[in-house]
Image (cartoon, rainbow, N blue to C red):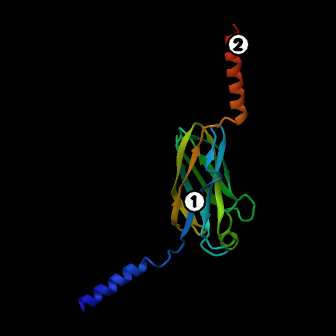
């Protein structure tokens, strides 16, 4: 009997991991290009996906941090998506803080009704976009952490995954015409030296 009970409990525990978590969705960093030149810029979208179109629970508020290498990148701007403003009326609070080196914190709270968020919110949408300026050559890992996620009803939500990304800053290559110009100037210098 004890052996049967142990087998039954083990199967329940193992089976619990196979049941999809309610409210499970993903928040990902999606760079718009992975290699840029120094002085250039790269936009990185923070995207929520895996929500179900037109059904509860919908996302009603979020507070997220994006980390980056401040010796390689600097924050140029932050723009918010419209996923929490389903009627386009501007009934939400948005903000960001990039005062800490290597971090940008952004948050949004929707004041759309629970019914409107649950019935009109898309299953995947951009929460916000960070545009970075490329400060120097190198690579920067981009990390994503959650301070808070909640449904339209105000209940805590859990993202099943917070996916990071990376951006590389490559040296600016000299075009072929520049090499031709450098060769011509060197040849002219040698020719003038021989004349003298």
Alpha-carbon neighbours of circle 1 within 10 Å: few (<14), some, or many (≥20)?
many
> Which residue shows up at 36% across the image and 84% down it?
11
Left or right, residue 105 beside residue 196: left
Looking at the picture, does residue 183 appear above or below residue 28? Answer: above
| CA separation in Å, label 2 and label 1 | 61 Å
Q: Residue 170 has which mark?
A: none
Residue 9's spot in the image, x, y percent? 33, 84
Looking at the picture, does residue 191 appear above or below residue 176? Answer: above
Q: Going from the N terminus, do you reach mark 2 or mark 1 first?
A: 1
> Which residue shows up at 59% across the image and 37% down it?
135
Residue at mark 2: 192
Using the image as rendered, state which of residue 158 and residue 69 is in the foreground: 69
Single out the residue that lies furthest toward the front.
194
> Which residue shows up at 67% across the image and 16% down it?
190
Single out the residue that lies furthest toward the left.
2
Task: Quarter of the image for the N terminus: give it.
Answer: bottom left
> Which residue shows up at 61% across the image and 66% down it?
49
Asked whether the residues under the numbered discs 2 and 1 touch, taking CB atoms below 8 Å apart as contact, a structural biologist would say: no
- Tell me the quarter of the picture where residue 121 sits: bottom right
Residue 124's spot in the image, x, y percent? 65, 66
Task: Quarter of the image for the C terminus: give it.
Answer: top right
- Tell me the quarter of the picture where residue 2 sits: bottom left
- Mark 2 vs mark 1: in front: 2
Residue at mark 1: 28
**Dot 2: what SS?**
helix
Using the image as rendered, state which of residue 119 and residue 53 is in the foreground: 53
Residue 179's spot in the image, x, y percent? 68, 31
Left or right, residue 148 beside residue 122: left
């Amino acid at each position: 009997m004890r052996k049967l009970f142990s087998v039954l409990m083990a199967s329940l525990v193992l089976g619990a991991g196979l049941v999809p978590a309610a409210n499970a969705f993903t928040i990902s960093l999606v760079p718009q290009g992975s290699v840029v030149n120094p002085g250039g810029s790269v936009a990185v979208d923070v995207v929520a996906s895996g929500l179900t179109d037109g059904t509860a629970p919908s996302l009603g508020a979020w507070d997220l941090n994006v980390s980056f290498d401040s010796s390689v990148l600097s924050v140029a701007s932050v723009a918010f998506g419209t996923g929490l403003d389903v009627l386009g009326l501007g009934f939400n609070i948005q903000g960001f803080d990039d005062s800490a080196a290597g971090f940008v914190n952004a948050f949004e709270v929707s004041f759309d009704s629970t019914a409107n968020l649950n019935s009109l919110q898309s299953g995947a949408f951009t929460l916000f976009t960070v545009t970075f300026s490329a400060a120097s050559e190198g690579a920067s890992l981009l990390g994503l952490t959650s301070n808070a996620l909640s449904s339209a009803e105000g209940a805590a939500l859990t993202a099943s995954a917070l996916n990071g990304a990376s951006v590389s800053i490559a040296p600016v290559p000299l075009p072929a015409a520049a090499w031709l110009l450098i060769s011509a100037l060197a040849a002219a210098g040698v020719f003038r030296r021989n004349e003298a």
